[in-house]
Structures are given as C-alpha cells and as structure tokens.
Image: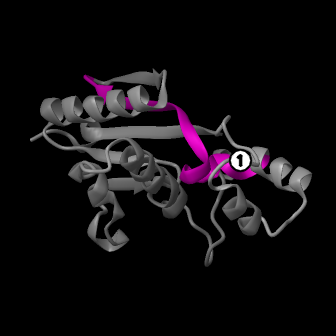
Amino acid sequence: NNNINENILSWNIISVPSSEFGKNHPLYESWMKKKKTQDENEGMEAFYKSAGFYAEYSKILCISACYLHKGKIRCTLFTGEEKDVIDKFILACESFIALKGSIVSAGHNIMQHSVPYLRKRYGHYYPMFDFPKYLSDLEEKPWTISSKVWDIMTINAGVGESYASLEELAY
C-alpha cells in the first residue's frame, strides 16, 4: 500500500483571455451582458482583466504539476497549444495513476475553478468523449471526496464565502 504523500498530485492551471475576441466574436454580446455594459472600450478592458477566469472566453496557457517520488519533489510544466497541454496533462495523470495506483489531487481552488475549467476546455476539443473519471470524481460533494482531493482554498476557508488567498495562507 502506497504512502498517501506519494499519491498527491498538486496541479494548477494558468489561463489567458482569448486573443481572437472582439466585436465579431460569437460570444461578444454575451460578454457585454455579463459585464453589464454597452460601452465597447469598457467591455474590452473588463475582458482583458477577467476573461481568463471563464473557460468560454479564454484558453489554457499551461498546467503545472508537482508530486513526490521517492522522497523528492518532481515538477512538470505542460506548455504549447492548448489541446496539446490538455492531452499531455491527461496522459501524465494516467501515467501517475498507473505508477502509484491512485491519485489525490491537490491545489488552490481546484474544486471551484481548475476542475470545472479543465472540464469545459476538454469538452471544447472532445465533445463526444467523457471527461476522465479520476478528474470528474473531484466534482462530487466535498464530504465524499476528502480522500481524492485537497483543495487548499477550501481547507483554509474562512466564514461563509470568505476564502483565504494564497498570499494570506503563506503569511
């Protein structure tokens, strides 16, 4: 039986606003409604500030992943075209499970952001295929998945929706 520390895969997604976005984009009107503005300059300014958080308006720039192997930390950065980044990360997860026998995902806000975001971007490229089970299991109820995921933001949550930031956690 493997030590649980050896089964932890800590990962994070870095996303950026889509460079193809503009007045002729099919979701332009939807964005303007989301941001409650009719002013094109105001809408575009808001787009470049916050669109990276929405899978519909952005893309994955890279995914970082770290894990313990024989007591040493190993880190990998998956970069390239978005589809390749997703494919490489999924393949790495599958290899990790084959090597370790199971996976415990860890990260900052992975349950509310990273997993749903990755699911949407994965579906963009593979609409006819199911999202990998070892990642989709992370979207279960928090009390049923404590052995599958450690979400640092959720673990260190304050009262209500007041979560601690990474900066606050590091203090």
- Residue 138, by quadrant, is bottom left
Q: Position of residue 167 (x, y in %)?
A: 70, 46
Total labels drawn: 1
Residue drawn at (15%, 29%) of the image: 99
In-image side of 64 versus 86 (left or right): right
In this view, the residue farthest toward the front is 24
Whether residue 166 appears in this view of the structure is no
Q: Which residue is mark 1?
A: 24
**Which residues make up the magenta segment?**
49-70
Residue drawn at (44%, 58%) of the image: 111
Residue 96 magenta-highlighted? no
Kind of element beneath mark 1? loop
Q: Position of residue 68 (x, y in %)?
A: 32, 29
Q: Residue 103 or 159: which is nearer the viewer?
A: 103
In this view, the residue farthest toward the bottom is 160
Q: Residues within 10 Å of mark 1 (few under 14, many from 20)?
A: few
Residue 51 magenta-highlighted? yes
Q: How is the image coloured?
A: one colour
Whether residue 25 appears in this view of the structure is yes
Establish if 27 lies above or below 96: below
Q: Residue 97 or 114: which is nearer the viewer?
A: 114
Establish if 50 lies above or below 161: above
> Of the residues shown, which amino acid type is indicated by label 1?
Asn
Residue drawn at (37%, 41%) of the image: 125
In-image side of 18 versus 142 (left or right): right
Establish if 101 lies above or below 77: below
In this view, the residue farthest toward the left is 1
Q: Position of residue 84 (x, y in %)?
A: 39, 26
Q: Which quarter of the figure is the N terminus placed in?
A: top left
